[in-house]
Amino acid sequence: MERLQFGRFQVGLLLACGLTFMSDAIQINLMSFLTLILSSLWNLDPHTTATLSATVFLGMFIGSLFWGVLADQIGRRIAFLAITCCITVASLGTSTARNVTEIKIWLLLMGISISGFVIPFDLLAEFSPNKGRARRLLLLNYFWALGSISVPLLASVTIGVDESSWRNLVRGCSVPCLLSLAIGHFFAKESPRWLAENGRHAEAKEVLKEVEKYNNVSEDNITMTPGFEFIVDSTGNSSQYSPEFPSSGNPYRDLLSPKYKQTTLKLWAIWFCKSFTYYGNVLLTSKIFGNHSVDEGGGDGFHDFDFSKVIISASSEFFATTLLIFLVSRLGRVPIGRYAYFSGGVFLLLFCLTQHVIFGVAARFAMVVAVNITWVHTPELYGTEIRGTGHSICSAMSRIGALLSPFVVYEFPVVVVGMLFFMSASLAGYLTNFLPETKGKDMGGAEEVAIMELEGKVIKIRRTNSDITELTNPSVFPTSKQAYTMMS
């Protein structure tokens, strides 16, 4: 993958994956408007209003439990296409709902569907060379920011036309996922890393050859042996060497194996806190800048959103992503996450105390930086054999936090909300400080094995992230002539 670099193929894949990210952002931000609109139209009490958003997050929790495992078992491509199909169906179905029960069913399906958007992220990561991987993955967050800002823009021109105008808003929000499905059909190839991990080396080579053609890279021999070291002698014979922590065959159990346990537990807590705080911030923004005097009898309630302030807050995501792309390869994942979470918590507390747009924008800015760095960091901490499951279960933990956020926002005093968000963000920042730094390292802390030959003698080295251990005949390592790199 290092030799193929980041070319036209990855640009097409970036577009397909980015539109999926945009769809997820759209559906999340849509709920901040849709819940208040339906509350007015259908005369819903605060608890029922909160359950609409909670239904989406419940679905996201359910979906997060199986999308990652599905991707690890049957492959990234099939999971990707299934996710985009389900999001499109759920979005169009939501626009047909006639009562609270029907819309909850469609919102549950929507939540289950969009919970799988970790798969497109991991797929792009596995097609990206190590150099500059974080910056390119962060480009996905421009799509997220575009999705965040497109909802209030679309709502400002559709809501209030008539009592069914919200249906047009929901239908319009389904377009990016339809485009993602179409583009993904051509560019969402199966991950060569996943194929090789499952012993399908010939198929992995074919995918890499297709990428070579897209990127105009000259064809070369491709040697991959993920998950194992091969000891090769001068006759060309080889024997397998099992890794230090072999898989148990149960991906859920492997997450809590000695190799991953400490990292997994910290990530679960961080993902819970980040989503509780971030999604709460999104809902809080619409609540504070919305109309507080809607007609209790079911008036339209559409005209009094302060769309300008909502759009300004959402626009901060573009600037946050740009800053993070500039800093991520310079400062690393851990220090950025630590300070972004803490500052986000402080600004959210100030936003709740003052309800001033400046603090709202600052809070959104800081939390976007924090959330995005966690997204980049997480798949880098897991190996290919468990990356989909690990990332997806982290997403499930985040959905529990997201599920709780609407009840906090809509049923607690604003000052109390600010204090809870401050504590949540601070905890996430504290735990981030204890995660391994992955800047400039291979994905997953994966073992990288090289077989090197000099004057008929074969040496073997194993590299774990940036630390090199010379296992045999180290004296000839500096002048080796040939190296075949095999990564998990």
Image (cartoon, rainbow, N blue to C red):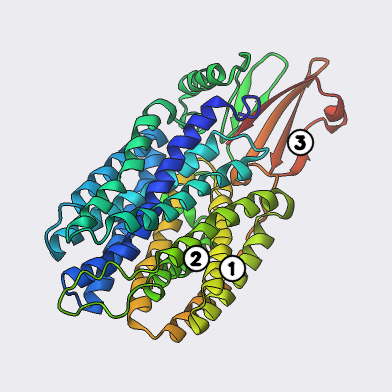
- Residue at 70%, 29% in the rendered image: 450
Q: Residue at x 66, y 60 (%)?
A: 336
Q: Quadrant of residue 132?
A: top right
Q: Is residue 182 above or below residue 412?
A: above
Mark 3: few/some/many CA within 10 Å (<14, 14-19, 20+)? few
The kind of residue on which mark 2 rests is: Lys
348 relative position to 276: left or right = right
Q: For the residue carrying disc 1, how many other residues have a C-alpha within 10 Å: few (<14), some (14-19), or many (20+)?
A: many
Q: Position of residue 457 (x, y in %)?
A: 79, 19
Q: Helix or strand or loop: what does disc 1 sit on?
A: helix
N-term mark: 3 or 2: 2
Closer to us: 220 or 197: 220
Between the C-alphas of marks 3 and 1, the distance is 41 Å
Q: Which residue is mark 1?
A: 341
Q: Position of residue 54 (x, y in %)?
A: 30, 67
> Disc 3 marks which residue?
471
Query: Which mark, by number, is residue 274?
Result: 2
Residue 261 in view: no
**Looking at the image, is mark 3 or mark 1 nearer the viewer?**
1
Task: Determine whether, in the image, residue 326 is placed left or right of residue 288.
Answer: right
Q: Could you tell which of marks 3 and 1 lies nearer the N-terminus? A: 1
Q: Looking at the figure, which quarter contains the N terminus?
A: top right
Residue 450 in view in this figure: yes
* Label 2 close to label 1 by CB (< 8 Å): yes
Q: In the rendered view, does 168 fall on the left or right side of 377?
A: left
Q: Secondary structure at mark 3?
A: loop
Give the number of marks: 3
Amino acid type, residue under disc 1 in the picture: Tyr
